[in-house]
C-alpha cells in the first residue's frame, strides 16, 4: 500500500491552499523582471551615466508624482482622461457584443459585418482623428469616438468567434425544451461566450489607453496626454514621465480587474 503524500515528505497535497500559494508565487515571479528593470534604471541614473534632463530616476518620478497629486489641477486632467477612456470602452463593449451576436444570429448581418471588418479593421484609426474633430468638435466627443472606433474591433471579433463556437446541441436542447430564441441568447449563448469576450475586452482596454493618450497629445486642452505635451514644450522631462506612469497604472488596473473577473467566472463555472 502506498502512503499518501504529506507535508513531511516535502510534497504539498493538491487543494485550495496549494492553489493559493501557487498563485502568490506566480505573482511574485511576474514582479521580478519589472523590479529588476527599475533597479537597473535607478542605478544608471544614480551613477551619472545619463543626464537627469534626458532620463530622470524612478525615485525622482515618484517624488514628482506625489507633489502633483496634491494639486487639484492634476486630478482634473486625470479625471477627464479616465472619463473619456471608460465611456469610450463601455460604448465599444456594448456595440461590439451586440454586433458580434447579430452577426451570428443573422446571415445577412454576418455578410455585411464581415465585409466591414475586412475593410475597416486594418485602417489606423488615429488617421481619422482630424475628420472626427471637424465632425464632432474639439472636445470629448471626437476623442471618445476615436476610442470606440479602435476598441470596437477586438471585442466584436472575439464575440463573433465565441458565438460561432458555442455548442449547437445546447441551443437545440434549450429550444426543444420550449425556450424562446431571445431566452436562448440570454441563458445559453451569453454565459458561454463571456470568457472569450473578456479576453477581447482586455485587448481593447490596452488599445483604449493608447488611443486616449495619443488623442490628448495631438489636440486637447486637458487630460494626461495634454500634460505631457505641455511639459515637452517646456523641456520639463520629469513632468513628461508623470502622465506616462499614470496612464500605465490605469491600464494595469484595468487589465488586472478584467483578469480578476475572468478568474472568478472560471471558478464559478
Image: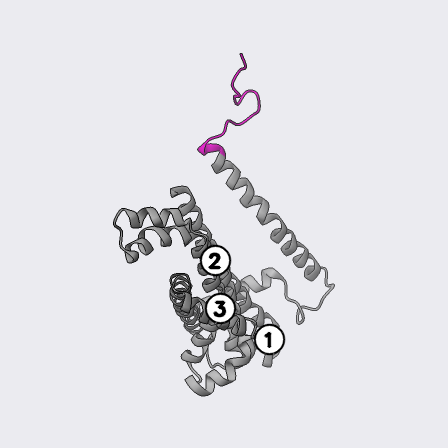
Residue 54, compared with residue 165, is above or below; it is below
Residue at 59% over, 60% down: 59
Crowd class of label 2 (few under 14; some 14 to 19; many from 20; radius 10 Å): some
Residue 114, numbered circle: 3
Q: Which residue is mark 1?
A: 236
Marks 1/2: CA–CA distance: 47 Å
Secondary structure category for the residue under label 2: helix
Secondary structure category for the residue under label 3: helix
Residue 161, numbered circle: 2
**235, 142: nearer the viewer:** 142
Disc on the earlier residue, 1 or 3: 3
Q: Which of pointers 1 and 2 indicates the residue nearer the eye?
A: 2
Q: Give residue 159's position: percent from left, percent from top.
A: 44, 59
Q: Give residue 71's position: percent from left, percent from top.
A: 44, 71
Secondary structure category for the residue under label 1: loop
Segment tinted magenta in the rendering = 1-18
Q: Is residue 104 visible?
A: yes
Crowd class of label 1 (few under 14; some 14 to 19; many from 20; radius 10 Å): some
| Cβ atoms under marks 1 and 2 closer than 8 Å | no
Q: Is residue 92 visible?
A: no
Q: Is residue 6 magenta?
A: yes
Amino acid at each position: 500500500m502506498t502512503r499518501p503524500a504529506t507535508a513531511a515528505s516535502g510534497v504539498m497535497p493538491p487543494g485550495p491552499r496549494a492553489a493559493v500559494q501557487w498563485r502568490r508565487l506566480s505573482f511574485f515571479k511576474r514582479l521580478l523582471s519589472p523590479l529588476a528593470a527599475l533597479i537597473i534604471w535607478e542605478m544608471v541614473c544614480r551613477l551619472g551615466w545619463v543626464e537627469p534632463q534626458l532620463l530622470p530616476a524612478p525615485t525622482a518620478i515618484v517624488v514628482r508624482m506625489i507633489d502633483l497629486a496634491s494639486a487639484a489641477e492634476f486630478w482634473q486632467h486625470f479625471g477627464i482622461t479616465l472619463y473619456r477612456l471608460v465611456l469610450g470602452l463601455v460604448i465599444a463593449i456594448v456595440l461590439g457584443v451586440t454586433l458580434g451576436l447579430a452577426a451570428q444570429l443573422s446571415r445577412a448581418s454576418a455578410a455585411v459585418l464581415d465585409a466591414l471588418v475586412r475593410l475597416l479593421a486594418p485602417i489606423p484609426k488615429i488617421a481619422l482623428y482630424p475628420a472626427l474633430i471637424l465632425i464632432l468638435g474639439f472636445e470629448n466627443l471626437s476623442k471618445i469616438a476615436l476610442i470606440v472606433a479602435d476598441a470596437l474591433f477586438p471585442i466584436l471579433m472575439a464575440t463573433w468567434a465565441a458565438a460561432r463556437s458555442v455548442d449547437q446541441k445546447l441551443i437545440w436542447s434549450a429550444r426543444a425544451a420550449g425556450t424562446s430564441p431571445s431566452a436562448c441568447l440570454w441563458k445559453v449563448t451569453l454565459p458561454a461566450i463571456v470568457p472569450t469576450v473578456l479576453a477581447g475586452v482586455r485587448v481593447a482596454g490596452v488599445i483604449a489607453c493608447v488611443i486616449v493618450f495619443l488623442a490628448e497629445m495631438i489636440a486637447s486642452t486637458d487630460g494626461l496626454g495634454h500634460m505631457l505635451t505641455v511639459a515637452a514644450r517646456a523641456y520639463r522631462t520629469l513632468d513628461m514621465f508623470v502622465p506616462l506612469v499614470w496612464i500605465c497604472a490605469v491600464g494595469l488596473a484595468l487589465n488586472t480587474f478584467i483578469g480578476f473577473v475572468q478568474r472568478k467566472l472560471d471558478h464559478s463555472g
